[in-house]
Image (cartoon, rainbow, N blue to C red):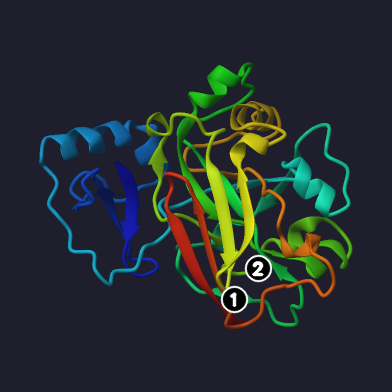
Amino acid sequence: MQLMRLGEPGSERPAVRADDGTVHDLSGLTADVDGAFLASGGIARARAALDRGLLPRLAVEGVRVGPPVAGIGKVVCIGLNYRDHADETGQVPPAEPVVFLKAADTVVGPDDEVLLPRRSVKTDWEVELGVVIGRTARYLDSAEEALDHVAGYALSHDVSEREFQLERGGQWDKGKNCETFNPLGPFLGPADEVPDPQDLGMRLRVNGRLRQDSSTRRMIFPVAELVRYLSWFVVLRPGDLINTGTPAGVALGQPEPKPYLREGDVVELEIDGLGAQRQRIGQA
């Protein structure tokens, strides 16, 4: 089962895709796939309604796919969580997770246009596993307890402007929060249907050329530890998103001239079991 939101920005309809590929309307069960839905057992209710044949079919050809979670409160990001990515960018792998925040309004649909910021010359790609919180998490003590607070997983693209991030002073926020800089989806995979979040292949291509090819097995800090660790610094609430870091293969780590994104480029990314995205790069 895959939870989705379909329709134009601001008017998305909640939906669920069954194992046979058919898509069904969830709007009779919930107004949206959001934190309140996730916290109140919405995934189980949706599964039960789908199994009982209570959800009407939807025609989805030509319909935009939106981000699979609405009303995200915060996006918590983890930097340098793959040793090979730290190595390629000339940075020391961290002893504790590197944490920064990304504004929730950067989140867009998986196939929406990504806009190069004005005066940008170093916009970069980053395929990441997204973790969506399903229960309020604070001061968790164990990895097992942490995973009990995860609603599901999604493919996330943490787009970054490296000059803004690294060369303009201050913290990383300036390079991470430009509009459209977090495509998410195409769907939310329920946690109980992802057997091992630490065994997912992940790939990203730019104009058909494979740039990132790795696995979540290579994370320095696995999902369970990230959720536990973060809960001691911020309250994680239902619907919050955690971007768990990217592996090697970003433009920043390439030889000169580094192949940063340009208008007209096409980025395609995927994570095993969590679908694929395709974005055309435009200009703000």
> Is label 2 in contact with label 1 (beta carbons under 8 Å)?
yes
The spot of residue 153 in percent (x, y) is: 47, 41
The spot of residue 272 in percent (x, y) is: 47, 45
Asked if residue 112 lies left or right of residue 235, the reply is: left
The spot of residue 279 in percent (x, y) is: 51, 70
Quick check: 167 above or below 42?
below
| Kind of element beneath mark 1 | strand
Q: Could you tell me which residue is drawn at 47 percent across and 37 percent down?
A: 238
- Of callouts 2 and 1, the N-terminal one: 1
Quick check: 159 above or below 280?
above
Q: CA distance from mark 2 to mark 1?
A: 8 Å
Quick check: 155 above or below 216?
below
Q: Could you tell me which residue is drawn at 82 percent across and 53 percent down?
A: 88
Under mark 2, the amino acid is Cys
The spot of residue 207 in percent (x, y) is: 57, 73
Q: Nearer the viewer, residue 49 or 259?
A: 259
Under mark 1, the amino acid is Leu
In what quadrant of the picture does the N terminus appear?
A: top left
Residue on which disc 2 sits? 178
| Disc on res. 115 | 1
Asked if residue 189 lies left or right of residue 115, the reply is: left
